[in-house]
Amino acid sequence: MPHSVSDTHQGVGAATEAREPSAIRGPFRVPAPHPAPTARLLARERIRTVVVDDHEDIARLVANRIATLIREKAAAGEIAVLGLATGSTPIGVYRELIRMHREEGLSFAHVVTFNLDEYYPMSPDSIHSYHRFMWENLFAHIDVREENVHLPSGSAPAKTVDEEARRYEDAIRRAGGIDFQILGIGKTGHIGFNEPGSGADSRTRLVHLDAVTRRDAAADFFGEEFVPREAMTMGVATILEAREIAILATGEHKSSIVRRAVEGEVDVEVAATFLQSHPNTTFYVDRAAAAELTRVATPWLLDEVAWTPELSVRAVVWLSQQTGRGILKLTQRDYADHKLSSLVARHGSPGAVNGMVFNTLGAKIRGKSKLPRGKRVICFSPHPDDDVISMGGILRKLVENENEMTVAYMTSGNIAVFDHDVRRYVDFLERLAAERGVGRELVEQVAQRVYAFLAQKKAGDVDIPEVQDIKRVIREAEAVSGIEVMGLSRKNARFLNLPFYQTGKVAKDPIGPADVAIVRALLEEVQPEIIFVAGDLSDPHGTHRMCKEAIDAALAEMGRAGRAALPEVWLYRGAWQEWPVTEATYLVPMSQEELRLKIQAIFKHQSQKDSAPFPGQDDREFWQRVEDRNKGTAQTLDRLGLAEYYAMEAYVTA
């Protein structure tokens, strides 16, 4: 089924009909946008914004637009000049362009490219360089001419940096300017590396990176201390001279800055707001990144809405939070003052609306007696700790309800183990071998190789197989220890070790047939009636999203093969964010003792304790986040006037 797309046009220079892609050549189709938005929406959103259901639709829309431009230019005997970005968001665009090159004959022989930025100092062949990123993810797979590829220099001597920047600007001018520029957006609102304080007249230059930007990049460099403090970047003025701009954002963690860029005032502290003055910019966002836009979060503030049950619940919960009153205490005046009179009119009285929403939320609550019993259940855990972090409460209840449980750890999680843990465990093996004489010679050989490698290892280097294996085994042992707290044993654990993850780097391979086959084999072996799947869209390194992609593909294959009954899918969150009570299908309460047990299980993951290698933007340990989020969900219900619980987990059924 095609995904829906909604859009809004900027008042000046709105896109022409030719820019409204209704289909993509090849096997994929993208639906036409919804009818034109209202004037009130146009006034609120200052950049034309396209909202799609899935991040893959963004890739297809943007790649299709680029392909159209390339073909139009080629037909006219002209070159197409593309401005390109790096990072996880545009990778989907590049993969689709590669597909179109291979399957549809899209040629890049007459395309000239200019990249936005590069870290400084940075060798072109470094694993962290954008030069290498672009060749690995795009240029090496298409017929672009090497002399037509331009990237800012990260290796120029310091005394020549300014001259290199001027040469880069001159090269763009000689090419005739950029026809189509791809942008991402950072959490500070930066485009390229134009950090807070960058002016509208800025050009290509060397900049100091903001602390937030460096922290965002810390996972890629295996530590914030290894992230360069400077970068070469196109300036805001250079970007705004592009004839067409596409800015992309996916995931809940971008929703706040998306709203700021689209609906906020132009501000030198948020470089993306300068795009409001550009006559041909389109912001492409998925539903998660669009979550805080007024038209998504509170559409009743803009215009007349169709009051569906889901929207009614969201509106009443919002009203309760705005007024500080419990749901059953909301009055006609409360509704009128907050532009919700039409909702009351639809139901006849405030009491009717209040009662409907109160009962709807109450019906979501599922204690142990209302949870599955005697079922075959698989919990898919992307990393070896997501099971207990995100669903430790329900996991214990499902065990108590005598369900047949399998916990499937989809990746090794080995890159998230510190090297000092490897040294500690190798030292333990050496001591055990010396003490008991078990495999002493082999242990010494492995230890020597490990110590020699770690002694010369640089940040970001791919571990040798011995180190990768040790890190994998550490996490597997911790995972078993964690589920033992829940009442399970090692026989309930399955370690899938999916191939896409086995790069030894933060960047992973795309999900492939081998990954899907492993997941499908487990599903066909266990034949679960219920599966739990990570639904986190703010996972900073994308593993949760990719694991879900493998599961979805396996289920789709089984459906096409005619399997009579596919399992019910429950989506969990918790590692990064929790489902809001308005979105949750089920809310599962936990007592103080149950939350304590869940935290004990998290503690078993000692390699992630105190300071995890990939903590995201939250300084708290995972157990602290869990405690606050689970208590916070329960407190939300309490403030809405429902029953008071100590803590709660939230789930959505797909």
Image (tube, helix red, strand yellow):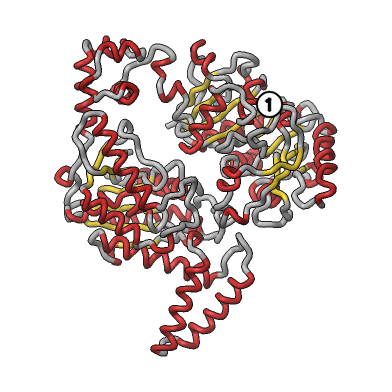
Q: Nearer the viewer, residue 167 or 266?
A: 266
Q: Return the residue found at the far bottom.
A: 437
Q: Where does label 1 land, which residue? A: 244
Residue 132 percent across, percent down from the top left: 69, 52
- Residue at figure coordinates x 46%, y 37% from the top left: 252
The 10 Å Cα crowd at callout 1, few under 14, some 14 to 19, many 20 or more, is some
Q: Position of residue 150 (x, y in %)?
A: 77, 43
The residue at 44%/41% (across/down) is 537
Compared with residue 12, is residue 30 higher up or lower down, i.e. above or below?
Answer: below
Instruction: Look at the image and tell me in which quarter the N terminus lies.
Output: top left
Question: Where is the C terminus found, in terms of image quarters?
Answer: top left
Residue 447: give x, y in percent of width and height.
52, 79
Residues 475 and 143: in front is: 475
- Residue at 40% from the left image edge and 42% from the top image edge: 577
Left or right for 150, reference 130: right
Q: Residue at x 55, y 55 (%)?
A: 506
The amino acid type, in three-letter code, at marker 1 is: Glu
